[in-house]
Image: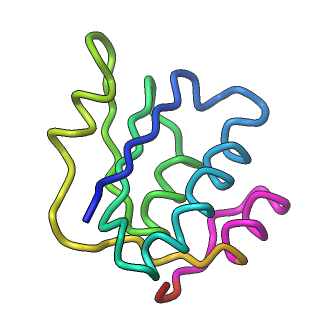
Amino acid sequence: MLSAVTYLADPAEPDAIDRLADTLSVLVSGVAGGLVGDAVIVAGRESEAVAAVAEATGATLVLHRGGNPYAAGAVAASPRPRIRASARSLACAASSGRAPASSEA
């Protein structure tokens, strides 16, 4: 299985959470197909919204300032599946500005 690593340099950007939800939602079919095992969100600064999305989806959240953010994400990657949100819950979260409800993929 693959680990998906995504990076948000500035989670405070107006569309950052929408972009994160879009990114994670496309991973759901990969999880269902057994290709994607886990997701790591690397953020350049703290954000309650990003933390809520990570918690709801089972993604690992890494705060990283300096160096290669993708390398930091790779270090945090896990071999066991952890993505739990469905594409629908992520889309709803993006449109409402809330963290998605957790469900098995």
Residue 46 appears left or right of 67: right
Residue 74 appears left or right of 17: left
Check the image and report above or below for 29 versus 39: below
Give the total of numbered labels: 0
Residue, x 31% and y 25% (percent of image)?
Answer: 64
Is residue 2 on the magenta stretch? no
Between 34 and 72, the one lying in front of the other is 34
Residue 70, position as x, y percentages in the image: 32, 29
Residue 61 appears left or right of 78: right
Residue, x 52% and y 58% (percent of image)?
Answer: 52
Residue 96, position as x, y percentages in the image: 83, 62
Residue 54 occupies which quadrant of the picture? bottom left
Check the image and report above or below for 98 versus 50: below
Residue 92, position as x, y percentages in the image: 78, 70
Between 98 and 42, the one lying in front of the other is 42
Q: What range is drawn magenta here?
A: 89-102
Residue, x 30% and y 10% (percent of image)?
Answer: 66
Q: What colouring method underlies this structural image? A: rainbow
Check the image and report above or below for 93 versus 62: below
Check the image and report above or below for 33 versus 22: below
Q: Residue furthest right?
A: 95
For the N terminus, the quadrant is bottom left
Q: Residue furthest bottom?
A: 104
Residue, x 17% and y 59% (percent of image)?
Answer: 78
Residue 13 occupies which quadrant of the picture? top right
Is residue 97 on the magenta stretch? yes
Residue 105 appears left or right of 82: right
